[in-house]
Image (tube, rainbow, N blue to C red):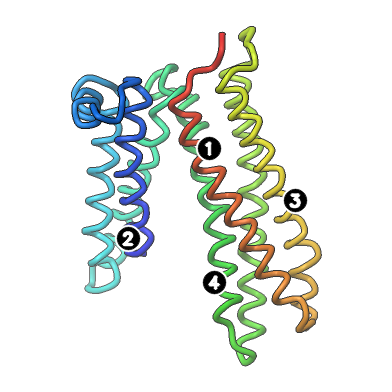
Amino acid sequence: MRGCLTILACAFLAYLPASALALTEAPAGELLPSVWLVLRHTHNGAMWLLGAGALIVAGIVSSRASVGPARSWLRGALAASLLIFLGARAGTGHAAEAGTFSLAVLVHAVHIAAGCAWTGCVMVSQAILLRRSDGDTLWHTAFLQRLSQVAALALTVVVVSGLLNVWRILGEQQTSFGAYEQRLAVKLSVVGLAAALGAWNRWIALPRLMRGDPSARKPFVRSLCAEAILLVLVILLAAGLGATMPSM
């Protein structure tokens, strides 16, 4: 958990200068003034500070959540801090135009959470396959089946919430096919490829593995690796979309 929080914190820290340059349209040489301007005078800066504070709390709590009599309370505090971080992240970009406490932000938060759940299930499944031993085959395949079910549910939520986001942003506007729409088309195409790989993993590769087919493991690992790479690319494209205005 601490390793995942470290990766998340590094990505969130790197997101600040990238979004600051995109929002201010400043050259790279003016990075520090741009970051300071965004943090002090924009809603995105305020949400970034809220998210950073939530991550700091999550990091402190995670170091103590596995020991002591107050373990359940600490785990609740960890969940709460991550939910605050999720809300802060969802409250930026186009969803914030409807208000910080709005249905649009809630839908976007669900979209982000489902995308993270899908990506996490794929990466954990790959790690299990790479580390599993023959003596633990039954336990591993049962766990993989459970992760596959969670990933399928997350994919459904991603599609529904994503369509709601697209309809909210573009459905009522006469837009041209500009930079935002091009990036959105690329993102949707990559999501489609990842979903196709996920369907192959769930309905073909995993059943073969559960039947004890030894030849199914390597193709399954390769497919999960490709799906994970595509999902990381989707996350990067989504981050870029958040700082790009739709064409009018």
* Nearest to viewer (mark 3 / mark 2): 3
* Nearest to viewer (mark 2 / mark 4): 4
**SS at mark 1?**
helix
Q: Which mark is residue 237?
A: 1
Distance from the alpha carbon under mark 3 to that under mark 1: 19 Å
**SS at mark 2?**
helix
Circle 1 crowding by C-alpha within 10 Å: few under 14, some 14–19, many from 20: some
Distance from the alpha carbon under mark 1 to that under mark 4: 25 Å
Q: In the rendering, at what x and y percent does residue 35 appear?
A: 23, 30
Q: In the rendering, at what x and y percent does residue 98 appear?
A: 44, 17
Instruction: State the count of labels.
Output: 4
Q: Which mark is residue 127?
A: 4
Q: Amino acid at mark 3?
A: Ala
- Residue 196 vertical placement versus 45 (above, below): below
Could you tell me which quadrant the C terminus lies in? top right
**SS at mark 4?**
helix
On the image, numbered disc 2 is attached to which residue? 75
Residue 123 placement, left or right of 45: right
* Nearest to viewer (mark 3 / mark 1): 1
